[in-house]
């Protein structure tokens, strides 16, 4: 599990049938600032995630992956 910020959305013209109707988002994982320890900063990496709850751009989200996501 990790905290991330929503940075955008993904548009797909062709999806696996089980993914039809699912909204795809790009997110940037966040970490604690190692210098001040009082804020979250981006890692510079990007992930594509499935949005199951209807979040919007620039919102903080909790990401689960692997068997926890099932």
Image (cartoon, rainbow, N blue to C red):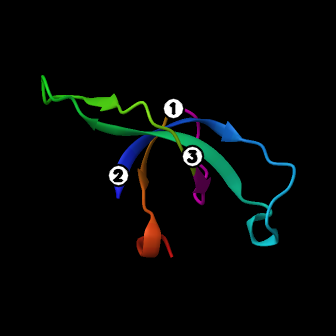
* Residue situated furthest left in the rendering: 36
Q: CA distance from mark 2 to mark 3?
A: 16 Å
Asked whether, in this view, residue 36 is left or right of residue 48, the answer is left
Could you say where residue 67 lies in the image, as x and y percent from the top left? 44, 76
* Residue situated furthest top in the rendering: 35
The quarter of the picture where residue 44 lies is top left
Residue 55: give its label: 3
Q: Are marks 3 and 1 in contact (CB under 8 Å)?
A: no
- Classed neighbour count for the residue bearing mark 3: other residues with Cα under 10 Å, few (<14), some (14–19), many (≥20): few
Nearer mark to the viewer, of 2 and 3: 2
In the rendered view, would you say 41 is above or below 62?
A: above
* Residue depicted at 41% across the width and 73% down the height: 68
Residue 25: give its label: none
The residue that label 2 is drawn on is 2
**Quadrant in which the N terminus appears:** bottom left
Asked whether, in this view, residue 9 is left or right of residue 48, the answer is right
Q: CA distance from mark 1 to mark 2?
A: 16 Å
Magenta-drawn stretch, dominant element (helix, strand or loop): loop
Q: CA distance from mark 3 to mark 1?
A: 9 Å
- Classed neighbour count for the residue bearing mark 1: other residues with Cα under 10 Å, few (<14), some (14–19), many (≥20): few
Q: Which residues are magenta?
A: 49-57
């Amino acid at each position: 599990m990790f905290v991330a910020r929503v940075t955008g959305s993904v548009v797909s013209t062709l999806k696996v049938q089980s993914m039809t109707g699912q909204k795809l988002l790009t997110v940037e994982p966040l970490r604690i600032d190692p210098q001040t320890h009082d804020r979250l900063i981006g890692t510079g990496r990007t992930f594509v995630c499935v949005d199951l709850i209807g979040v919007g751009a620039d919102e903080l989200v909790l990401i689960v992956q692997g068997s926890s996501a099932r």
